[in-house]
Image: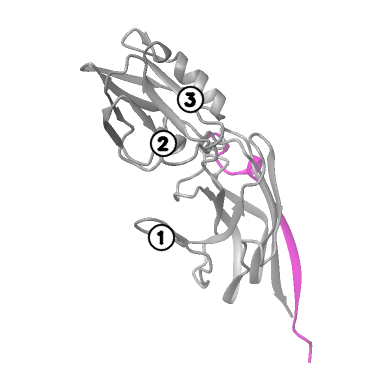
Amino acid sequence: MKQQTTIKKIINIDSRFRENFNDSASSDFTVKLNYPLSGVLSMRLDQIEVPNSWYNISKKIGNNKIKIMMNNIDYEFLLNDGMYSYGEVKEALENSMSNGRKFSSLFTFDIDEYSNKITISSKSNLKLTINFGNNERTLGWFIGYKKKLYENASTYTAENMFNDTNNRYFYLVINDFNTNINDYIIGNLKDYYINDNIIARISVIDTKYNIISNFNNDSHGTQTRVYTSRSNIDKLHIKLLDEYGQVLDLNGLDISFTLEFQLFVK
């Protein structure tokens, strides 16, 4: 009688080789396995390389503008999409225009070197109404202001410290088109949760434009996906989701990772 054993296979996935390259994103794509797998017992993330290339301020996120009313005149100042530090936010905002006026001609935008908190003030000491918008990803939230609306004062200091990091981690989601699995990682958000096919939570520890490279095991944010019966895999749908469960925009740069599979063999 032959002994039943398992073997290990490691498959490299690179978003450059995805299906429908021109009509898909490197953070949301489908890849066909030209080496299809049968008798799969488990899958886990082995290594991953992701470029830290997403913007921390963008129109898509909804945090690229600030609305200020002063002396019954409404101003809306816009920032271009990009990855900003404090100094870059300050420079871009001070040079932005609304109603023919520069931000810097009407208001000040400064950070306290000890508290690391932003203060926005009227240069003329007139009362301001600042409107950052409704969601928790506004420019105000990004620079430390917790409320959506500030009224009846000429100066406002942010409640929180300025922090130019808008993604401390992200989720790797892999749909292998099998249903005989259990979800181990659950992202608990404010009003709902995400759990479908998350195989890893990756911490962002590298600075902008660097490659985030992780060597993972079951104690570092990734879990082995165990199948309740032997499975066949010939296609994968890959997603990278940010802290809010939205697909990360890597601005065209590609990702790669390796998956380790345990296969049943007779």
Please tell me in which quadrant of the rendered image residue 2 appears: bottom right
x, y percent for residue 172: 57, 54
Does the magenta run of residues contain 105?
no
Farthest residue, direction left: 72
User: Looking at the picture, which amino acid does disc 1 mark?
Assistant: Tyr
Q: Using the image as rendered, state which of residue 105 and residue 138 is in the foreground.
A: 105
Q: CA distance from mark 1 to mark 3?
A: 37 Å
x, y percent for residue 31: 60, 49
Q: Residue at x 31, y 35 (%)?
A: 133
Q: Which mark is residue 92?
A: none
Query: Going from the N terminus, do you reach mark 1 or mark 3 first?
Result: 3
> From the viewer's perspective, is residue 85 above or below residue 171?
above
Q: Nearer the viewer, mark 1 or mark 3?
A: 3
Instruction: Give the quarter of the figure containing the C terminus.
Output: bottom right
What residue is shown with label 1? 193
Instruction: Give the quarter of the figure containing the N terminus.
Output: bottom right
Q: Nearer the viewer, mark 2 or mark 1?
A: 2
Q: Residue at x 42, y 36 (%)?
A: 61
Q: Residues within 10 Å of mark 3 (few under 14, many from 20)?
A: some
> Is disc 1 in contact with disc 3, using a CB cutoff of under 8 Å?
no
Q: Residues within 10 Å of mark 2 (few under 14, many from 20)?
A: some
Colour mapping used in the image:
one colour
What residue is shown with label 3? 110
x, y percent for residue 192: 36, 59
Does 64 sit left or right of 45 as displayed? left
x, y percent for residue 29: 54, 46
Residue stretch in magenta: 1-22
User: Looking at the picture, which amino acid does disc 3 mark?
Assistant: Asp
What residue is shown with label 2? 158
